[in-house]
Amino acid sequence: MMNSNPKVQSANSKKVRPKNLNLFTIRMPINALVSILHRVTGCALFLALPLLLVTFQLSISSASKFQLVQDLMHSPLAKLILLGLAWSFFHHFFAGIRHLAMDVHWATTLIKARYTSKMVFVLGGLATLLLAISWVL
Amino acid sequence: MAIYSVVLLIRVLLLMPSSYEDWLAFSQPWWWCLATFLFWVSLSSHAWLGVRDVLKDYVPNVKIRMVLLKLVVLALWVYMVWITFLLCSL
């Protein structure tokens, strides 16, 4: 039986409203992917700030502490974290520059925006890869 | 911040600081400390705007969001004082 009260009716229709926020069922266009990763990497970098400060403090406090930081950075776990943060930084860097370009109305058409999105991924990946190679060498 | 990052990369590649003495010499010039300080001021305002936007979008509960926002501000101020202290101790 339908409820004639409009308030109750809207409350009922709210209940059956379909939700489709499962990220695995939403196909993200490349521009959306760059955008959400810009956010995620920004958050990661923000959370890494205390780590950066502690590392810098140790590295400048004494020669032995400097050595300790160097040894820590050579551990596989530290390298994994650093690589993740490095990629975060590079992605955020290039996606940020893309944003600045779009703020001055450069590359705002869909085709160009898709192209610059790909560039962000390529440059971010390449920069991280170069860093990884420089560690191995 | 982008300019500072590029200059940092270039300086690292040019000077290749590997010992403690090198690292101090790398960090100690007054103009580099000043640049780092200005970088951190920019970083703080940038992080504030970014995290504020993220919390606005993903924390619908106003009370919880306000607490988180205040914690973010507090953290950024602590970091600001911290980096200033470190730069002055160089």
Image (cartoon, helix red, strand yellow):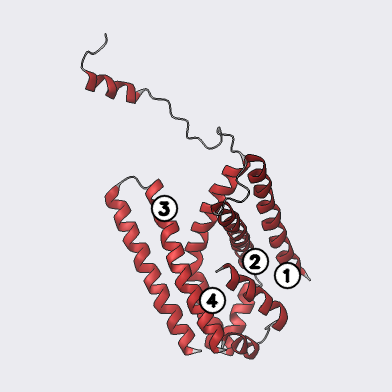
| Amino acid of disc 3 | Asp
- Element type at mark 1: helix
Whole-angstrom CA distance, mark 1 to mark 2, is 9 Å
The amino acid on which the numbered mark 1 sits, given as a three-letter code, is Trp
- Can you say whether B79 is above or below B33 in the image? above
Mark 1 in CB contact with mark 3 (< 8 angstroms): no
Above or below, comparing residue A83 to residue B57 in the picture = below
Do discs 2 and 4 belong to a common subunit?
Answer: yes
SS at mark 4 in the image: helix
- Where is the N terminus of chain A found, in terms of image quarters? top left
Q: Amino acid at mark 2?
A: Lys
- The reply to whether label 1 and label 2 mark residues of one chain is yes
Residue B71 badge: none
With A129 as the anchor, is B4 left or right in this view? left
Instruction: Kindly identify which residue carries mark 2.
Output: A79
Q: Residue at x 64, y 48 (%)?
A: A117
The residue identified by callout 4 is: A55
Identify the mark nearer the N-term, 1 or 4: 4
Quick check: marks 1 and 2 in contact, CB under 8 Å? yes
Screen quadrant of the C terminus of chain A: bottom right
According to the picture, the residue beneath numbered tag 3 turns out to be B53
In the image, taking residue B45 as reference, residue B29 lies left or right, namely right
Q: Which residue is mark 1?
A: A135
Disc 4 and disc 3 in contact, CB within 8 angstroms: no
**Which chain is indicated by disc 4?**
A
Chain letter of disc 1? A
Identify residue type, mark 4. Answer: Thr
Task: Tell me whether circle 1 and circle 4 mark residues in contact (CB < 8 Å).
Answer: no
Work out whether residue A92 or residue A50 is closer to the camera in this orientation and state it.
A92
